[in-house]
Amino acid sequence: MKLYLNSKKMDNYKKSNKLTLSNKIKAKTKKQYKNIIAKNKITENDLQSLTNMICNDFKVNTINVIFTGTQIKKQNSIVKGYCKVQKNIKVIKPLHIKVFKYTSTRKKVIATKTAVNTILLHEIVHYLDYSLFNLSKSIHTAGFYKRITALKNMLNF
């Protein structure tokens, strides 16, 4: 099956694939990440403080993080979080990141590492796509996933 994209979407797709994150993560951000990952329970304040530090390291405005609600089941997937943006203006304005606190099936609080590594960092990369790279849409390209991996590696070393 062929995927047909208009030229604007194709330009955004190609740009997304080419973008990389350079290592700007400071030692105190790495320490905060390690402290949060070591916790049994995570709070909205933990997620917000880590997000603020990452944003500051990349010299972009901070974004609010909301940690509440239950993950949403869709046909073939589960929505675990999202980066909400305002699109009805000339410049896309990120509004907040939401990380769902409870699993969709058992309604249990998600594990700390899942909240941070799987959900929060994914949504932060969406945010960086808008605020750092000025993409018109943050899409799941190979380059996007490479940026997530790069951010995780920066925080772990």
Image (cartoon, grey):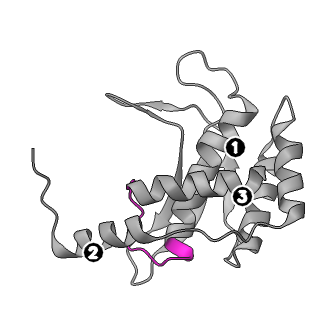
Quick one: label 1, few (<14), some, or many (20+) residues within 10 Å? many
Specify the label residue 154 is tagged with.
3
Q: Nearer the viewer, mark 1 or mark 2?
A: 2
* Residue at the image position 76 percent from the left and 66 percent from the top: 25
Q: At numbered mark 1, what does the secondary structure look like: helix, strand or loop?
A: helix
Q: Nearer the viewer, residue 21 or 99?
A: 21
What are the residue bounds of the magenta stretch? 130-141
Left or right for 7, reference 114? left
Judge whether 16 appears above or below 157 on screen.
below
First reached walking from the N terminus: tag 2 or tag 3: 2
Left or right for 123, reference 10? right
Q: Nearer the viewer, residue 121 or 70?
A: 121
> Which residue corresponds to mark 2?
11
First reached walking from the N terminus: tag 1 or tag 2: 2
Whole-Å distance between the Cαs marked 2 and 3?
Answer: 28 Å
Q: Nearer the viewer, residue 133 or 81?
A: 133
- The residue type indicated by label 1 comes to Val
> Which residue corresponds to mark 1?
116
- The answer to whether marks 1 and 2 mark residues whose Cβ atoms lie closer than 8 Å is no
Left or right for 14, reference 145? left
